[in-house]
Image (cartoon, rainbow, N blue to C red):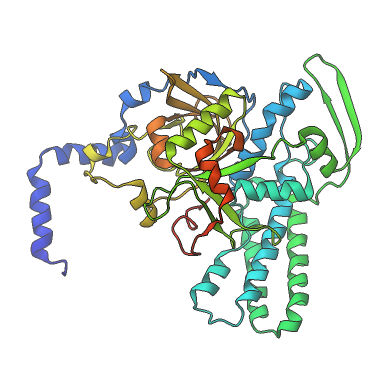
Amino acid sequence: MNLTKDLLQQFADAYAKDKNNGVIAAAISNVGVKEASRNRLAANNHSFIFSDEIDHKNITNKKKSGRCWMFAALNMARPKIMEDLKLEEFEFSQTYLYFFDNMEKTNVFLDKIMATKNLDINSREVIRALEFQTSDGGYFEWFKTLADKYGLVPKSVMGESFSSQNSADMFDRIHEVIKKYAMDIRRTADADCEAIKVECLSKVYNILAKCLGEPVQKFDFEYVDKDKKYHLDRDLTPQLFYKKYLGDFYEGMVRLINDPRERNPYGRVYINPSTKNVLESDGLAGLNVPIDAMKAAMIRSIKDKRTAWFACDVGKMSDRQAGILDGSIFNFEQTLVPVGEFTKADRLDSRQAVANHAMNITGVNLRDEKPVMWKVENSWGDEPGKKGVFSMSDTWFSEYVFEMIVNKKYVDAEYLKGLEQAPIIYDDFDAFVELINW
């Protein structure tokens, strides 16, 4: 069917027939779609008061970078170290792991290029390999792999730089380098590719060292506790600091995913072996559970004073400045047009759903033992929301949360059985594999 003048006139006549359209159009032209559609009654439901919560003190700020996944993972452990050491505030260095993350991603990128070098440049496999380039995005599992390999350090010994907080220009130059070497690899005999790979990695190291600083190798950890007592721990390595102050904190975790598409049953593990930031890792695996099972695990974790990392589609039905995540916060169907039923499964398959942000759930408001609102620790500084804290409605959780990291002990036993079965491999081009887009 072509778009004809008659058809356009039909649309125009229908638009003119509804007298409300002119009033709504005037409002939207003056204040924009969101402000004209704002549902203040829905906003009033968010008191930012929670029946069960975990105190996390200061709010972190990733600024103009895509490191939310790393901030959220590090923020999981902040309450522990502040309680153990009696600290008012504490922050891990995000820049330290950021350096190694981008070195490792470059290594994975070059390996993918080498593995596909003999395929047609326009093949889906080569295009996918070229798309996996050094960038800020990631997952909790990627953080855990990096922390286990390289350790952690306090922010006091390796702080932020301009480029860690404003990463676009740094990545522009890195991408220029690695894409050039990708083409060199495609034109080079297999026996000579490793040398080219090493040369490229050396140049990326050079860029990262200049933009972020070289990673600290040994340091003294000093702090003053709540009782004003000074402490000094000398000659620590990042690995020793990690083991000494966090121990097995990150062990026993499981990635829960909510993939509601009927063809993917609950209680099974789904894996994408190629989704990795470190070459020696096994890829990204998740135990598929119903959304209510995910919530139940989260509530148990909160009651045990453990926060949880989660990934969501933060751009949907969210008021950033107010710090509200609520499917009713905007009346788009009244100001614009009704969409009709559009399920979470259909949004996944149509690529309308995207997990573009990771945060921490640090509390819940229970009424009659059922969740109504969730407390969210963000990494956008303390200006949005209530001093950086967001309030997420339970219905928003159902629609826009896709994965969560909790300890296995909080998950229903009937679903944990799935960890004992062989994982189901996601196709490289499955919507859930493409879901993450920081």
- The image position of residue 340, as x and y in percent, is 23, 45
Q: Nearer the viewer, residue 243 or 253?
A: 253
Q: Residue at x 56, y 81 (%)?
A: 119
Position of 50 relative to 405 (above/below)? above
Q: Residue at x 50, y 60 (%)?
A: 426
Numbered-mark total: 0
- The image position of residue 60, as x and y in percent, is 63, 34
Residue 319 seen in the figure:
no
Q: Quick one: which residue is furthest to the right in this view?
A: 235
Image position of 137 (left or right of 29): right
Position of 33 relative to 131 (above/below)? above
Q: Nearer the viewer, residue 93 or 239?
A: 239
- The image position of residue 260, as x and y in percent, is 39, 47
Q: Quick one: which residue is furthest to the top in this view?
A: 227
Position of 18 relative to 389 (above/below)? below
Image position of 424 (left or right of 5): right
The picture quadrant where one finds residue 174 is: bottom right
Q: Residue at x 53, y 43 (%)?
A: 256
Q: Nearer the viewer, residue 182 or 383?
A: 182
Position of 106 relative to 322 (above/below)? below
The picture quadrant where one finds residue 189 is: bottom right
- The image position of residue 157, as x and y in percent, is 81, 38
Image position of 331 (left or right of 356): left
Q: Which image quarter is the N terminus in?
A: bottom left
Residue 129 seen in the figure:
yes
